Amino acid sequence: MNQQRISESEMESKYVIRADECRGSDLAYLDQRIPNHEREIVNVIGMNVVENLTDPLLEPKIGSAHGFSLVYNRAKEGSQSGAALHAHQTEEVFIPLVGSWEVIWLEGDNERSVRLEPLDVINVPVGIYRGFRLVSGGPDSIMLAIVGGPDAGNVSWHPNVIERARETGLEVDEEGNLVKLKL
């Protein structure tokens, strides 16, 4: 392998993002208008499986990556917000960075959960309906999500989430893109 060279200034300008520069979107996914699912999505590295491709706030802060994406999910203090039940064609890793979070999943029709503290890690297998919610934390609690695979496909929402999202004026089209309904 040829050793690559990179200057400090190039490293800083192309491959480093500072936490105070990480601003994201409050409308990346179908579930974000549903009560207790409001959150900010920050695509840090790579483009996660987002449904609102027109939002410039969802552009990856450090560009693309091969085979994974790294995303911050921010929830407000006391909100108990997080992602509604969904599945991916890839594994998904969750790591709380700030705050205590609960990862939920379905075992048949039964909801199961595990509470995670900062730096705990869970790897949710392919095809499992999963979600997460903030249990307790301070301002700007953050759950890191890593989605693997070169093509994560679209989000598969649990049918209940789709129904609830339609009540807020959102749905997803055949290609997995967010659509605002006329109510």
Image: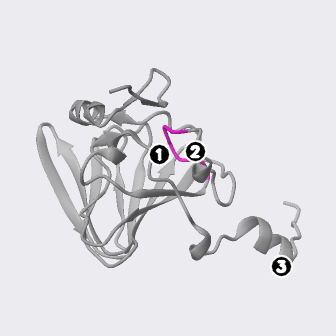
Q: CA distance from mark 3 to mark 1?
A: 33 Å
Sequence-earlier tag: 3 or 1: 3
Instruction: Check disc 3 and report the residue beneath it.
Output: 8
Marking on residue 177: none
What residue is shown at x 25% (from left), y 54% (from top)? 36
Q: CA distance from mark 1 to mark 2?
A: 8 Å
Majority secondary structure of magenta residues: loop
Q: Amino acid at mark 2?
A: Asp
Question: Is residue 80 positioned above or below 32 on the image?
Answer: below
Question: Is residue 23 positioned above or below 127 on the image?
Answer: below
Q: Amino acid at mark 3?
A: Glu
Sequence-earlier tag: 3 or 2: 3
Residue 57 left/right relative to 140: right
Sequence-earlier tag: 1 or 2: 1
Residue 63: give x, y in percent of width and height.
69, 54
Highlighted magenta segment, given as a residue range = 46-52
